[in-house]
Image: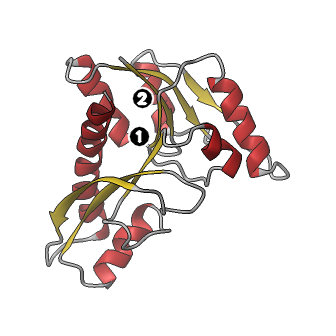
Amino acid sequence: MISLAVLGSTKGTDLQTIIDAIESGELDAKIEIVISDKNDAHILERARKHNILAVYIEKFKQESRKDYDKKILNEMYNKKIDLILLIGWMRILSPTFVRNYHKKILNVHPSLLPKFSGGMDTNVHEEILKAGETETGCTIHYVDEGVDTGEIILQKKCSVDLDETVESLKNKVQKLEGKAFVEVIKLFL
């Protein structure tokens, strides 16, 4: 069995796909903790609904990234975490955090990296449409000290239709993201 921690700032749509795979027996995994930097993030509610420890960690304006990440590390301290999944995590992790979990932190990016790296959420989909791309998808990659520069583990592709909107493209790509996470977790098993 693999032990997971999830960091998320948004709805956690991909988290539900992972939870469903665990509950159906498709994945031999346990989500030990879900942490958010947003008190009202739906990902926390989603975790609580499935009896997963859900923790909000407040970020203070004067607090450094390193100090904030120490609070996250403290929450995970007594848990044996095999993999950390970043699902809609809207923060850059400190080098110290990344070094503590070298090749154990996975991020999902809503494009086929290296294309459209550095962007987040709907901004990425907007840029894909502006560029006239005919294909996009998602990338699961290791987190390193750069932004979207870690080694790529898996990519899933989909077409960009002529009448595509930012929202329709986001929905299409999100359907791939959860499946991609499940596949990658299976690789680690």
Question: In which quadrant of the rendered image does the C terminus lie?
Answer: top left
Please tell me whether residue 168 is drawn above or below residue 27 in the rendered image. Answer: below
The amino acid sitting under disc 2 is Arg
- Report whether 110 appears left or right of 4: left
Could you tell me residue 97's position as x and y percent? 66, 42
Which residue in the protein does label 2 denote? 46
Q: For the residues marked 1 and 2, what is the alpha-carbon distance in whole angstroms? A: 7 Å
Rendered position, 137 above or below 53: below
The residue furthest right is 62
**Horizontal relation, residue 32 to residue 140: left or right:** right
SS of the residue under disc 1: loop
**Which of the two discs, 1 and 2, labels the residue nearer the N terminus?**
1
User: In this picture, is 186 found above or below 146?
Assistant: above
Q: Is residue 62 left or right of residue 34?
A: right
Q: Amino acid at mark 1?
A: Gly
Please state which of residues 35 and 152 is positioned toward the viewer in this rendering.
Answer: 152
Circle 2 residues within 10 Å: few <14, some 14–19, many ≥20 = some
* Residue density around tag 1, few if under 14, some if 14–19, many if 20 or more, within 10 Å: many
